[in-house]
Image (cartoon, grey):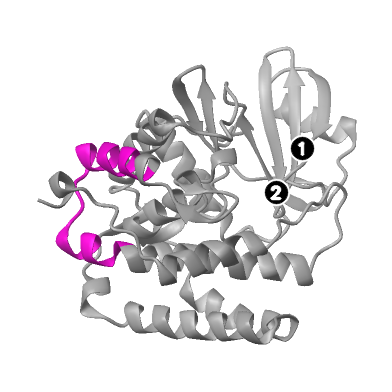
Protein backbone atom coordinates (compact mmCIF):
# COMPACT_ATOMS: atom_id res chain seq x y z
CA UNK A 1 0.00 0.00 0.00
CA UNK A 2 2.70 2.45 -0.99
CA UNK A 3 2.00 5.87 -2.49
CA UNK A 4 2.92 5.93 -6.19
CA UNK A 5 0.49 8.70 -7.19
CA UNK A 6 0.09 11.73 -4.89
CA UNK A 7 -3.60 12.70 -4.61
CA UNK A 8 -4.46 16.38 -3.92
CA UNK A 9 -6.83 16.90 -0.99
CA UNK A 10 -9.46 18.63 -3.16
CA UNK A 11 -9.42 15.78 -5.70
CA UNK A 12 -10.18 13.24 -3.00
CA UNK A 13 -12.75 15.58 -1.45
CA UNK A 14 -14.65 15.93 -4.72
CA UNK A 15 -14.79 12.14 -5.23
CA UNK A 16 -16.07 11.47 -1.72
CA UNK A 17 -18.73 14.14 -2.06
CA UNK A 18 -19.81 12.68 -5.41
CA UNK A 19 -20.17 9.27 -3.76
CA UNK A 20 -22.25 10.74 -0.93
CA UNK A 21 -19.66 9.80 1.70
CA UNK A 22 -19.45 13.18 3.42
CA UNK A 23 -17.08 16.12 3.75
CA UNK A 24 -13.40 15.13 3.73
CA UNK A 25 -11.61 16.02 6.97
CA UNK A 26 -8.32 14.14 6.72
CA UNK A 27 -6.35 12.35 3.99
CA UNK A 28 -3.35 10.21 4.94
CA UNK A 29 -1.13 8.04 2.75
CA UNK A 30 -0.79 4.42 3.90
CA UNK A 31 2.62 2.83 4.32
CA UNK A 32 3.35 -0.81 3.58
CA UNK A 33 2.45 -2.97 0.61
CA UNK A 34 3.82 -2.63 -2.88
CA UNK A 35 1.06 -2.68 -5.49
CA UNK A 36 -1.32 0.30 -5.28
CA UNK A 37 -1.61 3.85 -3.99
CA UNK A 38 -3.72 3.89 -0.83
CA UNK A 39 -5.02 6.61 1.46
CA UNK A 40 -7.07 6.65 4.63
CA UNK A 41 -9.84 9.20 4.11
CA UNK A 42 -11.87 10.45 7.08
CA UNK A 43 -15.10 12.36 6.50
CA UNK A 44 -17.86 13.66 8.73
CA UNK A 45 -19.75 10.44 7.89
CA UNK A 46 -17.12 7.81 8.50
CA UNK A 47 -13.74 6.32 7.61
CA UNK A 48 -12.83 5.10 4.13
CA UNK A 49 -9.92 3.79 2.09
CA UNK A 50 -9.16 5.36 -1.29
CA UNK A 51 -7.18 3.11 -3.66
CA UNK A 52 -5.60 4.08 -6.97
CA UNK A 53 -4.64 1.02 -9.02
CA UNK A 54 -1.13 1.17 -10.44
CA UNK A 55 -0.93 -2.18 -12.25
CA UNK A 56 -4.44 -3.56 -12.58
CA UNK A 57 -6.44 -2.32 -15.55
CA UNK A 58 -9.97 -0.97 -15.75
CA UNK A 59 -10.90 -4.22 -17.55
CA UNK A 60 -9.57 -6.40 -14.72
CA UNK A 61 -10.89 -4.38 -11.78
CA UNK A 62 -14.64 -5.17 -11.94
CA UNK A 63 -13.81 -8.74 -10.84
CA UNK A 64 -12.22 -7.58 -7.58
CA UNK A 65 -14.75 -4.88 -6.77
CA UNK A 66 -17.80 -6.98 -7.53
CA UNK A 67 -16.32 -9.91 -5.62
CA UNK A 68 -15.97 -7.76 -2.50
CA UNK A 69 -19.53 -6.49 -2.95
CA UNK A 70 -20.76 -10.06 -3.40
CA UNK A 71 -19.01 -11.32 -0.27
CA UNK A 72 -20.05 -8.34 1.85
CA UNK A 73 -23.69 -8.89 0.91
CA UNK A 74 -23.37 -12.51 2.08
CA UNK A 75 -22.10 -11.59 5.52
CA UNK A 76 -18.36 -11.98 5.01
CA UNK A 77 -16.56 -9.07 6.75
CA UNK A 78 -14.81 -7.49 3.78
CA UNK A 79 -14.59 -3.87 2.56
CA UNK A 80 -17.62 -2.91 0.47
CA UNK A 81 -16.93 -0.65 -2.55
CA UNK A 82 -18.91 2.58 -2.74
CA UNK A 83 -21.03 3.16 -5.85
CA UNK A 84 -21.88 6.43 -7.58
CA UNK A 85 -25.42 7.43 -8.59
CA UNK A 86 -25.15 5.17 -11.66
CA UNK A 87 -24.13 2.19 -9.56
CA UNK A 88 -20.53 2.25 -10.78
CA UNK A 89 -17.92 0.88 -8.35
CA UNK A 90 -14.88 1.90 -10.42
CA UNK A 91 -13.93 5.58 -10.51
CA UNK A 92 -11.06 7.70 -11.86
CA UNK A 93 -8.59 9.75 -9.79
CA UNK A 94 -5.51 11.53 -11.19
CA UNK A 95 -5.87 9.55 -14.41
CA UNK A 96 -5.83 6.21 -12.59
CA UNK A 97 -8.68 3.74 -11.98
CA UNK A 98 -9.76 4.06 -8.35
CA UNK A 99 -12.16 2.72 -5.73
CA UNK A 100 -13.39 3.78 -2.30
CA UNK A 101 -14.29 1.20 0.34
CA UNK A 102 -15.37 1.45 3.95
CA UNK A 103 -12.54 1.19 6.49
CA UNK A 104 -13.06 -1.86 8.68
CA UNK A 105 -12.72 -1.75 12.46
CA UNK A 106 -9.90 -3.48 14.28
CA UNK A 107 -6.19 -4.06 13.81
CA UNK A 108 -3.93 -6.80 12.54
CA UNK A 109 -2.57 -9.40 14.97
CA UNK A 110 1.03 -9.91 13.90
CA UNK A 111 1.86 -12.53 16.54
CA UNK A 112 -1.24 -14.75 16.36
CA UNK A 113 -2.16 -17.49 18.78
CA UNK A 114 -4.01 -20.69 17.80
CA UNK A 115 -7.39 -19.02 18.44
CA UNK A 116 -6.60 -16.34 15.86
CA UNK A 117 -5.59 -19.01 13.34
CA UNK A 118 -8.83 -20.87 14.04
CA UNK A 119 -10.87 -17.72 13.40
CA UNK A 120 -9.09 -17.21 10.07
CA UNK A 121 -9.62 -20.85 9.06
CA UNK A 122 -13.33 -20.66 9.88
CA UNK A 123 -13.89 -17.42 7.97
CA UNK A 124 -11.74 -18.51 5.01
CA UNK A 125 -13.95 -21.58 4.54
CA UNK A 126 -17.08 -19.43 4.81
CA UNK A 127 -15.65 -17.02 2.26
CA UNK A 128 -14.90 -19.85 -0.18
CA UNK A 129 -18.46 -21.17 0.11
CA UNK A 130 -19.95 -17.67 -0.19
CA UNK A 131 -18.11 -17.17 -3.49
CA UNK A 132 -19.43 -20.31 -5.18
CA UNK A 133 -22.23 -18.43 -6.97
CA UNK A 134 -20.11 -15.42 -7.96
CA UNK A 135 -20.65 -15.08 -11.69
CA UNK A 136 -17.44 -13.37 -12.87
CA UNK A 137 -14.36 -15.39 -13.77
CA UNK A 138 -10.77 -14.15 -13.77
CA UNK A 139 -7.68 -16.31 -13.23
CA UNK A 140 -5.21 -15.83 -10.43
CA UNK A 141 -2.92 -13.35 -12.20
CA UNK A 142 0.00 -14.39 -9.95
CA UNK A 143 -0.48 -18.09 -10.59
CA UNK A 144 1.75 -20.64 -12.33
CA UNK A 145 1.90 -18.89 -15.75
CA UNK A 146 3.19 -15.74 -14.01
CA UNK A 147 5.77 -17.74 -12.07
CA UNK A 148 7.04 -19.24 -15.32
CA UNK A 149 7.20 -15.81 -16.99
CA UNK A 150 8.85 -14.02 -14.08
CA UNK A 151 11.47 -16.57 -13.02
CA UNK A 152 13.81 -15.78 -15.96
CA UNK A 153 13.77 -12.11 -14.93
CA UNK A 154 15.00 -12.80 -11.40
CA UNK A 155 17.34 -15.75 -12.05
CA UNK A 156 20.30 -13.49 -13.03
CA UNK A 157 20.20 -11.99 -9.52
CA UNK A 158 20.46 -15.34 -7.69
CA UNK A 159 23.44 -17.37 -6.59
CA UNK A 160 23.91 -20.94 -7.85
CA UNK A 161 22.06 -22.61 -4.98
CA UNK A 162 19.12 -20.22 -5.17
CA UNK A 163 18.86 -20.59 -8.94
CA UNK A 164 18.85 -24.37 -8.61
CA UNK A 165 16.09 -24.22 -6.00
CA UNK A 166 13.97 -21.96 -8.19
CA UNK A 167 14.36 -24.11 -11.31
CA UNK A 168 13.70 -27.36 -9.44
CA UNK A 169 10.61 -26.05 -7.68
CA UNK A 170 9.16 -24.58 -10.87
CA UNK A 171 9.61 -27.94 -12.59
CA UNK A 172 7.91 -29.68 -9.66
CA UNK A 173 4.95 -27.28 -9.66
CA UNK A 174 4.47 -27.60 -13.42
CA UNK A 175 4.44 -31.38 -12.96
CA UNK A 176 1.84 -31.13 -10.16
CA UNK A 177 -0.34 -28.76 -12.21
CA UNK A 178 -0.45 -31.29 -15.07
CA UNK A 179 -1.68 -34.11 -12.83
CA UNK A 180 -5.20 -35.54 -12.60
CA UNK A 181 -5.19 -35.00 -8.83
CA UNK A 182 -4.62 -31.30 -9.32
CA UNK A 183 -7.41 -31.13 -11.90
CA UNK A 184 -9.76 -32.62 -9.29
CA UNK A 185 -9.18 -29.85 -6.75
CA UNK A 186 -12.26 -27.68 -6.07
CA UNK A 187 -11.97 -24.11 -7.28
CA UNK A 188 -13.57 -20.72 -6.95
CA UNK A 189 -12.71 -17.11 -6.09
CA UNK A 190 -9.81 -16.95 -3.63
CA UNK A 191 -8.12 -14.09 -1.78
CA UNK A 192 -4.62 -15.40 -2.63
CA UNK A 193 -2.82 -12.99 -0.26
CA UNK A 194 -4.44 -13.47 3.16
CA UNK A 195 -1.42 -12.65 5.29
CA UNK A 196 -1.58 -11.46 8.89
CA UNK A 197 -1.56 -7.81 7.79
CA UNK A 198 -4.63 -8.37 5.58
CA UNK A 199 -6.83 -9.57 8.46
CA UNK A 200 -8.31 -7.44 11.24
CA UNK A 201 -9.39 -8.37 14.76
CA UNK A 202 -11.58 -6.17 16.93
CA UNK A 203 -10.62 -7.55 20.33
CA UNK A 204 -10.97 -11.33 20.01
CA UNK A 205 -13.42 -11.09 17.10
CA UNK A 206 -12.27 -11.40 13.51
CA UNK A 207 -13.56 -8.15 12.00
CA UNK A 208 -12.30 -8.22 8.44
CA UNK A 209 -10.45 -9.64 5.47
CA UNK A 210 -9.17 -6.91 3.14
CA UNK A 211 -6.84 -6.14 0.19
CA UNK A 212 -8.49 -8.40 -2.38
CA UNK A 213 -6.48 -7.10 -5.33
CA UNK A 214 -4.60 -10.37 -5.86
CA UNK A 215 -7.84 -12.36 -5.86
CA UNK A 216 -8.75 -14.69 -8.70
CA UNK A 217 -10.29 -18.03 -9.51
CA UNK A 218 -7.93 -20.76 -8.36
CA UNK A 219 -7.93 -23.78 -6.09
CA UNK A 220 -9.28 -23.23 -2.59
CA UNK A 221 -6.38 -25.36 -1.37
CA UNK A 222 -3.84 -22.83 -2.65
CA UNK A 223 -5.63 -20.09 -0.67
CA UNK A 224 -5.45 -22.21 2.47
CA UNK A 225 -1.78 -22.99 1.85
CA UNK A 226 -0.92 -19.29 1.52
CA UNK A 227 -2.56 -18.70 4.90
CA UNK A 228 -0.73 -21.59 6.56
CA UNK A 229 2.60 -20.32 5.22
CA UNK A 230 2.13 -17.01 7.01
CA UNK A 231 -0.06 -17.73 10.03
CA UNK A 232 1.35 -21.11 11.04
CA UNK A 233 5.14 -20.95 10.78
CA UNK A 234 8.03 -19.77 12.92
CA UNK A 235 8.73 -16.48 11.16
CA UNK A 236 12.44 -16.38 11.94
CA UNK A 237 13.28 -19.88 10.74
CA UNK A 238 10.40 -20.50 8.30
CA UNK A 239 9.54 -23.75 10.10
CA UNK A 240 6.09 -25.28 10.44
CA UNK A 241 4.15 -24.55 13.67
CA UNK A 242 1.94 -27.60 14.33
CA UNK A 243 -0.37 -26.04 16.94
CA UNK A 244 -1.33 -23.02 14.88
CA UNK A 245 -1.60 -25.11 11.70
CA UNK A 246 -3.92 -27.62 13.38
CA UNK A 247 -6.10 -24.81 14.76
CA UNK A 248 -6.53 -23.28 11.31
CA UNK A 249 -7.12 -26.57 9.50
CA UNK A 250 -9.56 -27.96 12.05
CA UNK A 251 -11.62 -24.75 11.99
CA UNK A 252 -11.60 -24.65 8.19
CA UNK A 253 -12.71 -28.27 7.92
CA UNK A 254 -15.49 -27.80 10.44
CA UNK A 255 -17.09 -25.58 7.77
CA UNK A 256 -15.78 -27.22 4.57
CA UNK A 257 -14.04 -30.61 4.93
CA UNK A 258 -11.15 -31.13 2.55
CA UNK A 259 -11.63 -33.62 -0.27
CA UNK A 260 -9.30 -36.57 -0.83
CA UNK A 261 -7.31 -34.84 -3.58
CA UNK A 262 -6.87 -31.78 -1.36
CA UNK A 263 -5.52 -33.83 1.53
CA UNK A 264 -3.05 -35.52 -0.82
CA UNK A 265 -1.82 -32.30 -2.42
CA UNK A 266 -1.63 -30.02 0.61
CA UNK A 267 2.17 -30.46 0.99
CA UNK A 268 2.63 -29.58 -2.69
CA UNK A 269 0.41 -26.50 -2.37
CA UNK A 270 2.36 -25.34 0.68
CA UNK A 271 5.44 -25.41 -1.53
CA UNK A 272 3.50 -23.62 -4.28
CA UNK A 273 2.44 -20.85 -1.92
CA UNK A 274 6.01 -20.33 -0.75
CA UNK A 275 7.31 -20.30 -4.34
CA UNK A 276 4.74 -17.73 -5.44
CA UNK A 277 5.77 -15.23 -2.78
CA UNK A 278 9.49 -15.91 -3.11
CA UNK A 279 9.30 -15.08 -6.83
CA UNK A 280 7.17 -11.97 -6.32
CA UNK A 281 9.43 -10.67 -3.57
CA UNK A 282 12.53 -11.30 -5.69
CA UNK A 283 10.85 -9.34 -8.48
CA UNK A 284 9.97 -6.42 -6.22
CA UNK A 285 13.41 -6.47 -4.58
CA UNK A 286 15.56 -6.53 -7.71
CA UNK A 287 13.22 -4.78 -10.18
CA UNK A 288 11.49 -2.16 -8.00
CA UNK A 289 9.23 0.67 -9.07
CA UNK A 290 9.56 4.24 -7.85
CA UNK A 291 7.17 5.13 -5.05
CA UNK A 292 7.02 7.25 -1.96
CA UNK A 293 6.96 5.10 1.19
CA UNK A 294 7.69 1.92 -0.81
CA UNK A 295 9.19 -0.81 1.39
CA UNK A 296 9.74 -4.03 -0.58
CA UNK A 297 9.76 -7.22 1.48
CA UNK A 298 12.97 -9.19 1.91
CA UNK A 299 12.71 -12.27 -0.36
CA UNK A 300 14.95 -14.34 1.93
CA UNK A 301 12.00 -15.12 4.21
CA UNK A 302 10.06 -17.11 1.62
CA UNK A 303 13.23 -18.76 0.38
CA UNK A 304 13.54 -20.19 3.91
CA UNK A 305 9.88 -21.21 3.96
CA UNK A 306 10.19 -22.93 0.58
CA UNK A 307 13.31 -24.84 1.62
CA UNK A 308 11.58 -25.98 4.81
CA UNK A 309 8.42 -27.05 2.95
CA UNK A 310 10.45 -28.93 0.32
CA UNK A 311 12.90 -30.69 2.65
CA UNK A 312 10.65 -31.24 5.70
CA UNK A 313 7.11 -31.76 4.43
CA UNK A 314 4.97 -31.57 7.53
CA UNK A 315 2.18 -34.02 8.26
CA UNK A 316 -0.29 -31.36 9.33
CA UNK A 317 -3.66 -33.05 9.02
CA UNK A 318 -4.73 -34.79 12.20
CA UNK A 319 -6.14 -38.30 12.27
CA UNK A 320 -9.65 -36.92 12.74
CA UNK A 321 -9.20 -34.42 9.94
CA UNK A 322 -8.23 -37.09 7.41
CA UNK A 323 -10.75 -39.71 8.43
Q: From the top left corner, tell me how far across and down residue 279 is, in percent.
A: 61, 70
Residue drawn at the location 85% of the way across and 46% of the way down: 293
Residue drawn at the location 69% of the way across and 79% of the way down: 154
Number of other residues with Cα within 10 Å of mark 1, as a class: few under 14, some 14 to 19, many 20 or more: some
In the image, residue 199 sits, relative to residue 229, either above or below, namely above
State how far apart marks 1 and 2 are (Cα): 9 Å
Q: For the view shown, which residue lies furthest in the top direction?
A: 44
Q: For the view shown, which residue lies furthest in the left direction?
A: 323
| Residue 265 magenta | yes
| Residue 143 magenta | no
Horizontal side of residue 135 vs 95, given as left or right: left
- In the image, the segment drawn in magenta is 245-266
Number of other residues with Cα within 10 Å of mark 2, as a class: few under 14, some 14 to 19, many 20 or more: some
| Residue 88 shows in the view | no
Residue carrying label 1? 30
Q: Nearer the viewer, residue 225 or 223?
A: 225
Q: Within the image, what quadrant is residue 79 found in?
A: top right
Residue carrying label 2? 33
Amino acid sequence: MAVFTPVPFDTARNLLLRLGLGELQNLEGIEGGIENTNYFATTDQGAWVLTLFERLTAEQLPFYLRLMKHLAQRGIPVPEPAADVRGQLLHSVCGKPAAVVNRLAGKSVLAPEPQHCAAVGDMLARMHLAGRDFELRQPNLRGLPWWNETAPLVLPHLDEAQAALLREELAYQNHIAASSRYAALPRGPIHADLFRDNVLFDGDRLSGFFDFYFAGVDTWLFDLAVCLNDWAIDWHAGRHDPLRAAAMLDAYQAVRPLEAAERQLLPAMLRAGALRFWISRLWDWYLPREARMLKPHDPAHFERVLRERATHPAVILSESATA
